[in-house]
Image: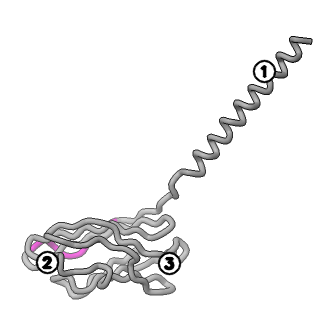
Amino acid sequence: MKKKNSLVKTDHKILLGLGIILILGLGFILIQPAKQQSFITVGTGTTEEGDVRIELTPAISDTLEVSIAANTHSVDLSKYDLMEITTLQTSQRTLAPTSAPTLSGHHATGKLVFETNKKELEKGFTITIRGIPATGEREFKWL
Protein backbone atom coordinates (compact mmCIF):
# COMPACT_ATOMS: atom_id res chain seq x y z
CA MET A 1 0.00 0.00 0.00
CA LYS A 2 2.89 2.39 0.74
CA LYS A 3 4.24 1.92 -2.79
CA LYS A 4 0.90 2.96 -4.32
CA ASN A 5 0.66 6.07 -2.05
CA SER A 6 4.19 7.02 -2.94
CA LEU A 7 3.39 6.75 -6.69
CA VAL A 8 0.28 8.89 -6.24
CA LYS A 9 2.31 11.55 -4.39
CA THR A 10 4.94 11.48 -7.14
CA ASP A 11 2.25 11.83 -9.82
CA HIS A 12 0.77 14.81 -7.96
CA LYS A 13 4.19 16.46 -7.70
CA ILE A 14 4.78 15.97 -11.42
CA LEU A 15 1.35 17.40 -12.29
CA LEU A 16 1.89 20.31 -9.92
CA GLY A 17 5.29 21.02 -11.48
CA LEU A 18 3.85 20.86 -15.00
CA GLY A 19 1.02 23.17 -13.96
CA ILE A 20 3.47 25.73 -12.58
CA ILE A 21 5.56 25.57 -15.76
CA LEU A 22 2.42 26.05 -17.89
CA ILE A 23 1.26 29.05 -15.85
CA LEU A 24 4.70 30.68 -15.94
CA GLY A 25 4.97 30.03 -19.68
CA LEU A 26 1.58 31.61 -20.38
CA GLY A 27 2.47 34.57 -18.19
CA PHE A 28 5.69 35.09 -20.14
CA ILE A 29 3.82 35.00 -23.45
CA LEU A 30 1.20 37.47 -22.23
CA ILE A 31 3.75 40.06 -21.04
CA GLN A 32 5.70 40.13 -24.30
CA PRO A 33 5.64 43.58 -25.90
CA ALA A 34 3.28 44.09 -28.81
CA LYS A 35 4.91 43.27 -32.12
CA GLN A 36 5.73 46.38 -34.12
CA GLN A 37 5.44 46.85 -37.84
CA SER A 38 8.30 49.04 -39.02
CA PHE A 39 8.65 51.04 -42.22
CA ILE A 40 11.58 52.38 -44.22
CA THR A 41 13.16 55.67 -43.25
CA VAL A 42 12.14 58.61 -45.44
CA GLY A 43 14.17 61.82 -45.47
CA THR A 44 14.06 65.32 -46.96
CA GLY A 45 16.45 68.26 -47.03
CA THR A 46 20.19 68.52 -46.56
CA THR A 47 22.63 69.82 -43.99
CA GLU A 48 23.75 72.59 -46.38
CA GLU A 49 23.60 76.27 -45.35
CA GLY A 50 20.02 77.31 -44.48
CA ASP A 51 18.55 73.79 -44.79
CA VAL A 52 17.64 70.96 -42.42
CA ARG A 53 17.84 67.22 -43.06
CA ILE A 54 14.80 65.50 -41.49
CA GLU A 55 14.41 61.72 -41.43
CA LEU A 56 11.32 59.86 -40.20
CA THR A 57 11.03 56.15 -39.40
CA PRO A 58 7.52 54.97 -38.43
CA ALA A 59 6.71 51.90 -36.34
CA ILE A 60 3.18 50.72 -35.54
CA SER A 61 2.10 48.83 -32.43
CA ASP A 62 -0.81 50.20 -30.38
CA THR A 63 0.02 53.71 -31.66
CA LEU A 64 2.06 55.14 -34.50
CA GLU A 65 5.51 56.02 -33.13
CA VAL A 66 7.75 57.86 -35.55
CA SER A 67 11.46 58.26 -34.85
CA ILE A 68 12.61 61.68 -36.03
CA ALA A 69 16.13 62.92 -36.63
CA ALA A 70 16.72 66.57 -37.55
CA ASN A 71 20.22 67.71 -38.50
CA THR A 72 21.55 71.05 -39.69
CA HIS A 73 24.70 73.13 -39.57
CA SER A 74 23.10 76.56 -39.75
CA VAL A 75 19.45 76.57 -38.58
CA ASP A 76 18.40 76.96 -34.94
CA LEU A 77 15.84 74.17 -34.47
CA SER A 78 14.51 75.51 -31.15
CA LYS A 79 12.14 77.87 -33.05
CA TYR A 80 10.05 74.93 -34.32
CA ASP A 81 7.34 73.23 -32.26
CA LEU A 82 6.61 69.82 -33.80
CA MET A 83 3.29 69.63 -31.91
CA GLU A 84 2.11 72.69 -33.86
CA ILE A 85 3.65 72.10 -37.30
CA THR A 86 3.21 68.33 -37.78
CA THR A 87 0.16 66.39 -39.03
CA LEU A 88 -0.62 62.80 -39.94
CA GLN A 89 -2.99 62.20 -42.85
CA THR A 90 -4.61 58.75 -43.09
CA SER A 91 -7.29 57.59 -45.51
CA GLN A 92 -9.86 58.58 -42.88
CA ARG A 93 -8.66 61.68 -41.03
CA THR A 94 -5.96 64.24 -40.21
CA LEU A 95 -4.31 64.06 -36.77
CA ALA A 96 -1.88 66.12 -34.72
CA PRO A 97 0.72 64.25 -32.65
CA THR A 98 -0.12 63.45 -29.03
CA SER A 99 3.55 63.91 -28.14
CA ALA A 100 6.65 65.18 -29.87
CA PRO A 101 10.26 65.90 -28.94
CA THR A 102 11.46 69.42 -28.33
CA LEU A 103 13.88 70.47 -31.03
CA SER A 104 16.99 72.39 -29.99
CA GLY A 105 20.43 73.20 -31.30
CA HIS A 106 21.49 71.73 -34.62
CA HIS A 107 20.90 68.01 -34.02
CA ALA A 108 17.72 66.62 -32.48
CA THR A 109 16.14 63.18 -32.19
CA GLY A 110 13.05 61.76 -30.55
CA LYS A 111 9.65 60.22 -31.21
CA LEU A 112 6.47 61.67 -32.64
CA VAL A 113 3.44 59.72 -31.34
CA PHE A 114 0.03 59.62 -33.02
CA GLU A 115 -3.07 57.94 -31.53
CA THR A 116 -4.19 55.73 -34.40
CA ASN A 117 -4.30 52.03 -35.25
CA LYS A 118 -2.95 49.61 -37.83
CA LYS A 119 -6.25 49.34 -39.67
CA GLU A 120 -6.43 53.08 -40.24
CA LEU A 121 -2.90 53.08 -41.72
CA GLU A 122 -3.33 50.09 -44.06
CA LYS A 123 -3.97 52.20 -47.18
CA GLY A 124 -0.91 54.34 -46.52
CA PHE A 125 -0.32 57.59 -44.69
CA THR A 126 1.47 60.91 -45.00
CA ILE A 127 3.20 62.98 -42.34
CA THR A 128 3.55 66.68 -43.10
CA ILE A 129 5.91 69.09 -41.34
CA ARG A 130 5.46 72.78 -42.17
CA GLY A 131 7.82 75.72 -41.86
CA ILE A 132 11.26 74.21 -41.27
CA PRO A 133 13.73 75.69 -43.80
CA ALA A 134 14.60 75.43 -46.60
CA THR A 135 11.30 73.85 -47.62
CA GLY A 136 7.97 75.39 -46.66
CA GLU A 137 6.19 72.05 -46.42
CA ARG A 138 7.74 68.57 -46.20
CA GLU A 139 5.69 65.49 -47.01
CA PHE A 140 6.78 62.02 -45.95
CA LYS A 141 4.70 59.23 -47.56
CA TRP A 142 4.34 55.53 -46.86
CA LEU A 143 2.02 53.47 -49.08
Is 114 or 5 nearer to us in this picture? 5
Split into 4 quadrants, where in the image is the N terminus? top right
Count of all numbered marks drawn on residues in the image:
3
**At numbered mark 2, what does the secondary structure look like: helix, strand or loop?**
loop
Of labels 2 and 3, earlier in sequence is 2
Residue, disc 1: 10
| Quadrant of the image containing the C terminus | bottom left
Magenta range is 41-48
Q: Determine crowd level at label 1: few under 14, some 14-19, many 20+ residues with C-alpha closer than 10 A.
A: few
Tell me: 87 left or right of 130: right
The residue beneath circle 2 is 51
Q: Is residue 47 magenta?
A: yes
Label 2 to label 3: alpha-carbon separation: 31 Å
Seen from the viewer's position, the closer of residues 59 and 143 is 59
Q: Quadrant of residue 131?
A: bottom left
* Category of crowding for the residue at label 3, using alpha-carbon neighbours closer than 10 angstroms: few (below 14), some (14–19), many (at least 20): few
Q: CA distance from mark 3 to mark 1?
A: 58 Å
Q: Earlier in the sequence, mark 3 or mark 1?
A: 1
Q: Single out the mark in the foreground, 3 or 1.
A: 1
Element at badge 3?
A: loop
Q: Amino acid at mark 3?
A: Lys
Please provide percent x and percent y for residue 82. Answer: 29, 79
| Foreground tag (1 vs 2) | 1
Inspect the image, locate mark 2, and give the three-letter code of the amino acid beneath it.
Asp
- The residue at which mark 3 appears reads as 123
